[in-house]
Amino acid sequence: MATADHLKALIKSHSQGDDERFYAIALQVAAQAARQGHTKMAKELRELVDRAKAQGENHLTGQQLKPVPIVQPRGELAGLLTAAFPSIRLADMALDPSLRARLERILLEQRQREQLRAHGMSPIRKLLLVGPPGTGKTMTASVLAGELGVPLFTIQLDALITRYLGETAAKLRLIFEATQETRAVYFFDEFDALGSERATKNEVGEIRRVLNSFLQFLEQDDSDSIIVGATNHPQMLDRALFRRFDSVIEYNLPSPDISEEVMRARLALLDTSQVDWSAALEAVKGLSHSDLTRACEQAAKNAILQGHTRINSDDLVDALRERRAMHR
């Protein structure tokens, strides 16, 4: 289950005393085991990592560990942000190797941000995620928060954007002030609603003022937080926005290999020994990660409702084709 690269990385991180990296690699091994159907082994590995982390923190503090509380927005921010404390990890995502490498680099820079700043450099922390729906943009925001152990604050655009002159900009200021006070991942989903091109024919003066305010706040922000914007329609965004972000990351529909990885992972707790994966892969064209997950869930429900846990190839292919039909 553990590859040679995993084993070498485990030994290297242990020898360097990098516990955080050691645990992250161990969780990657657990996720790989789960994808291969070794669910018991994966569960045991995760439990070992959790216990090791707990013992390490108890050793440092000499105190009983307590659950990490979720930071909750208060006052005016309460209606603008929703808070979560995700536990999802990068190893739980099925990603193209180049995309995984980019996210690993962002996490590395965040974990070593003090070392970078000591040399006059800043870590990547302003991200724009672009690509089709269901390809992992929202999950990436959760992964960043989960890996870094910080809250995920999702901005509620319906509460942020108002028709009253200057009110939206004032609310934006509150959010950027919060980035200074509370280190977290601040997630602007459906970002095109806020950052649409200023020169469009239907654009109104207030939207232009809001976008100008956002550009100013984003450029001036020097907090320790991570700011993430996500959009399915990058062509609608104002060109000036792209220059304000540290990194623009493109998400695409999954390749056949990634599609199979997504399906195997989602069905890992069920019997897939009779699944014709080649037939399933013929039906995945045009489907996103989210589509694949939902199709697998439908096939799994069919099996459970029939009184067993064996996945039928026909059920899986039919579920995939049904998801494709929804996009026509």
Image: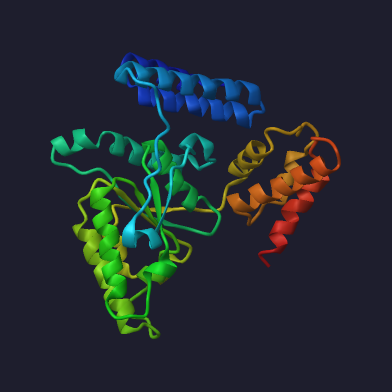
Indicate the position of residue 115 as horizontal and vertical percent values.
Answer: 20, 33
Determine whether, in the image, residue 76 is placed left or right of residue 193. left
Q: Would residue 281 be found to the left or right of residue 187 on screen?
A: right
- Residue at point 20% right, 35% down? 114
- Give the image location of residue 51, x and y in percent: 47, 19
For the C terminus, the quadrant is bottom right
Q: Is residue 240 visible?
A: no
Establish if 165 lies above or below 159.
Answer: below
Indicate the position of residue 169 as horizontal and vertical percent values. Answer: 28, 71
Outermost right residue: 306
Q: Nearer the viewer, residue 303 or 94?
A: 303
Residue 242: quarter of image: bottom left
Residue found at x 83% / y 35%: 308
In terms of image quadrants, where is residue 230?
bottom left
| Quarter of the image that includes the N terminus | top right
> In this rendering, does residue 310 appear at all?
yes
Q: Image point 62% across, 44% down: which residue?
A: 259
Q: How did the renderer colour the structure?
A: rainbow
In this rendering, the answer to whether 47 lies above or below 219 is above
> Toward which corner of the image does residue 305 lie, by quadrant?
top right
Total numbered labels placed on residues in the image: 0
Q: Which one is nearer the viewer's eye here, 24 or 88?
A: 88
Residue 59's x, y, as percent?
34, 16
